[in-house]
Image: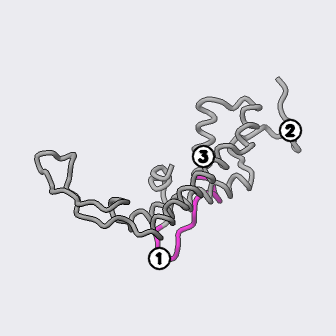
Amino acid sequence: MSTPASAAEDKPFDPKDFPKDLLAAQLKLAELYAALHAHQARLPWSREADDGWPDEPERWHRPGRPETTGWEAAAAETYDRLWEDLRKAAAAVQGHNHWKICKQYGVEGADLVAARQALKNAEGAVPAPKKDEPALDQDDVERAA
């Protein structure tokens, strides 16, 4: 089986040696996810106006919801834009040429999944905490994934 030519023929291929543009794309994806999550946390529970409903204690899977006027137009536009940007960023990460090269080197199945998961924790791919915010830890990354 032939493998792609590399600058360092004597160095074995490492699927976790991510190119800078892939790290940047993953960082953008993580930042967009965080921005969407933060924006969504500030929104009313329903996009549309709703009368809500009372709490039904005997039906634990249906907690009550208060009445809401729904989302303001600007908030909905921001949400929709963030979602669209997030989809594009995810497509850039998932469709990156690095994954094709991995397959050319025989990295498949669980090994390819492990490389994709490693990208989410790679240095340069996880957003740095903002001032006065705790650093992201593994649980944060897994929830974002």
Q: Residue drawn at (69%, 32%), measured in percent from left and top?
A: 107
Secondary structure under the numbered disc 3 in the rendered image? helix
The N terminus lies in which quarter of the figure?
top right
Quickly name the residue at label 3. Answer: 118
- Give whichever of discs 1 and 2 has the lower sequence position: 2
Q: Which residues are magenta?
A: 121-134
What is the magenta segment's predominant secondary structure? loop
Quickly name the residue at label 1. Answer: 132
Q: Residues within 10 Å of mark 1 (few under 14, many from 20)?
A: few
Q: Residues within 10 Å of mark 2 (few under 14, many from 20)?
A: few
Residue 21: mark in rendering: none
Residue situated in front as seen by the camera: 31 or 121: 31
At label 3, which amino acid type do we have? Ala
Q: Is residue 121 left or right of residue 67?
A: right
Mark 1–mark 2 contact, CB under 8 Å? no
Quickly name the residue at label 2. Answer: 10
Where residue 60 appears, as percent x and y from the top left, is 18, 47
Where residue 40 appears, as percent x and y from the top left, is 42, 62
Q: Is residue 128 magenta?
A: yes
